[in-house]
Amino acid sequence: MTNYGTIPTSSSGPPNVEYISRAKQVIREGLGTRRPWKEMFNLHSIKLPSGISDAFSRIKTNFSYFQMNYALIVLGIVFLSLLWHPISLIVFIVLMAVWLFLYFLRDEPLVIFNRLISDRVVLIVLAVVTVGLLLLTHATSNILISLAVGIFVVLIHAALRKTDDLFMDEERAGFLSPSS
């Protein structure tokens, strides 16, 4: 007797439920503790830079250290600007899911064609694809203005935030990978 046409069953639970619970855990742990918002907005760490070179140095260091926080801020500002453009908002929500899977929820480094792709490259590619697809939804002025506002906010924070207290322990010094 053959079993043609039968559907094989799995003894384990549904994989979607396991993946969703894992995603929730990663979001809670990763986004909640990766770079704490209290640390980012510590009022005692805000001071005018001493000069242009100090400002550029702070921007570079703070961008590397708060990279994920800054991405969330810019994406949040873009999201708020799209509330009055439903098609753009739908595209943006789909792109946010892509961001979650390719940038925020990744446990392991991204490898394509046996090449390791750095988190910075993933961030840049996702940003360009997000902006490109959103521009195709004819909300160009909203998107460009919100991106300019987001970048301005990030640059102001990065220039004003002192960097002398960012690398206090060696465990947190490995800041370039969101999975660290």
Image (cartoon, rainbow, N blue to C red):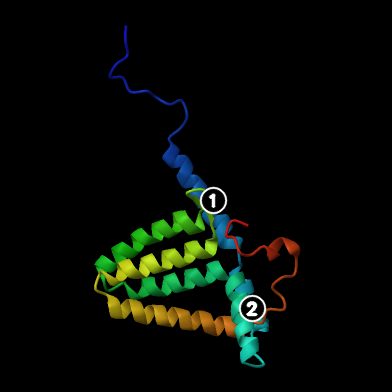
Figure quadrant of the C terminus: bottom right
Viewer can see residue 92: yes
Residue 126 location (% of width, % of height) = 42, 64
Left or right, residue 41 beside residue 11: right
Task: Give the secondary structure at mark 1.
Answer: helix
How far is the residue under mark 2 from the one under mark 1? 26 Å
In the image, residue 176 sits, relative to residue 101, either above or below, namely: below
Residue 21 x, y percent position in the rendering: 49, 46
Q: Is residue 125 above or below residue 21?
A: below
Number of marks: 2
**Mark 1 Cα-neighbour bin, 10 Å: few <14, some 14–19, many ≥20:** few
Disc 2 to disc 1: CB gap under 8 Å? no
Q: Quadrant of residue 67?
A: bottom right
Identify the element where label 2 is drawn. loop
Residue 73 on image: x %, y %: 48, 73
Q: Residue at x 75, y 70 (%)?
A: 168
Q: Is residue 50 above or below residue 124?
A: below
Residue at the limit of the structure toward the right, as seen here = 169
- Residue 133 is marked as none
Q: Quadrant of residue 16?
A: top left
Callout 2, which amino acid?
Answer: Asn
Determine whether 51 is above or below 88 in the image: below
Using the image, tell me which numbered label, if any, was put on residue 42: 2
Place of residue 75 in the rendered image (x, y in percent of width and height, measured from the top left): 43, 70
Q: What label sits on residue 25 in the rendered view?
A: 1
**Closer to the camera in the image, 118 or 65:** 118
Quadrant showing the N terminus: top left
Residue extending farthest bottom: 51
Given residues 129 and 62, the one toward you in this image is: 129
